[in-house]
Image (cartoon, grey):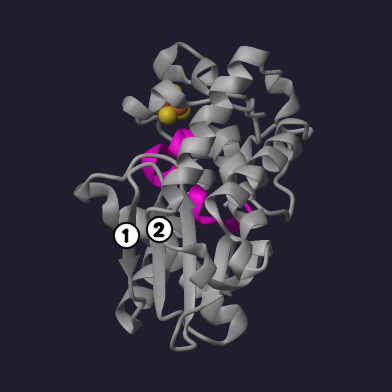
Amino acid sequence: MALAVPTSLSPSKVSSFRDCALAFRFSAIDRLPEPPTVPAAKGTVVHRALELLHCLPNADRTPAAAQECLVQAMDDVLSSDEYAPLALAAEQREAFHAEAAELVRRYFGIEDPRTIDAIGMELKLEAEVGGVVLRGIIDRLELGPDGELVVTDYKTGRVPSERFEQGRLGGVHFYAYLCEAVLGRRPAKVQLLYLAEPVAIVAEPSDQSIRGLQKKVGAIWSAVERACEREDFRPNPGRLCDWCSFKAHCPAFGGELPAVAVQPPQPQLLSA
Ligand code: SF4
């Protein structure tokens, strides 16, 4: 019996399929629950803090204000249904706060938020390409000094090695494509802000990069359809297994595959 084909793709699902087809199946098709993790919570908190910061008038976006935004973001995120189960003890919460505060501090080493003219944050965009629905959430869309659109994505993990850099930028080209398809304008620049370093990786979308993105999405979608038809999503054991939520189910580690999809995929946003 063939597995149900997912209804959409997001940048994270594209890289999940490329990293390990089986982990993709567990998440996008079987929809096994993924328990919250501290790194994911930290990323969400820092994103929220920067979102709050950019909601302030430009002149008020100071490092001190950013730390106040962080306190509010921690309260919002750690009490949410998604992350409350982490139930951090006081000491863990203190360490969490210190690490998140450092990331927010380092953000100011990349740019001065008082100069940023954000026109959208946490923007949910959706478009169809070759019969596939692409969905994504853009962290920040802004108008550059020359009035051109700029897409910004915050990263709280480490900068990828050169070998993986194009893959990470592929996600940003994905957002550039969505922007052009939905808003009718191609961004002049897409950038990943790696807060921990801190460093920005910047790319300029072109006809070639957009064509490349369309080709890549088409190829991945065909591979997903084929894998569903054949029920053939293979594990790809490697260093990512250490962080995989599905290790207990993975045959590469003695687990058992679900007999059929736990529930058919719903037409909802797969996390970006
Ligand atoms: S444990 Fe490793 S091989 Fe297994 S599903 Fe997760 S990432 Fe893939």
Point 39% across, 75% down: residue? 189
Point 77% across, 31% down: residue? 79
Q: Nearer the viewer, residue 90 or 166?
A: 90
Quadrant housing the N terminus: top right
Residue receiving disc 1: 201
SS for tag 1?
A: strand
Point 47% across, 74% down: residue? 150
Q: CA distance from mark 2 to mark 1?
A: 5 Å
Residue 137 badge:
none
Please report contact status of discs 2 and 1: CB closer than 8 Å, yes or no.
Answer: yes
Residue receiving disc 2: 192
Residue range corresponding to the magenta coloring: 3-23
Relative to 166, residue 87 above or below: above
Q: Is residue 200 left or right of residue 104?
A: left
Number of residue marks: 2
Residue 95, position as x, y percentages in the image: 54, 21
Q: Nearer the viewer, residue 22 or 222?
A: 22
Q: Is residue 214 left or right of residue 39?
A: left
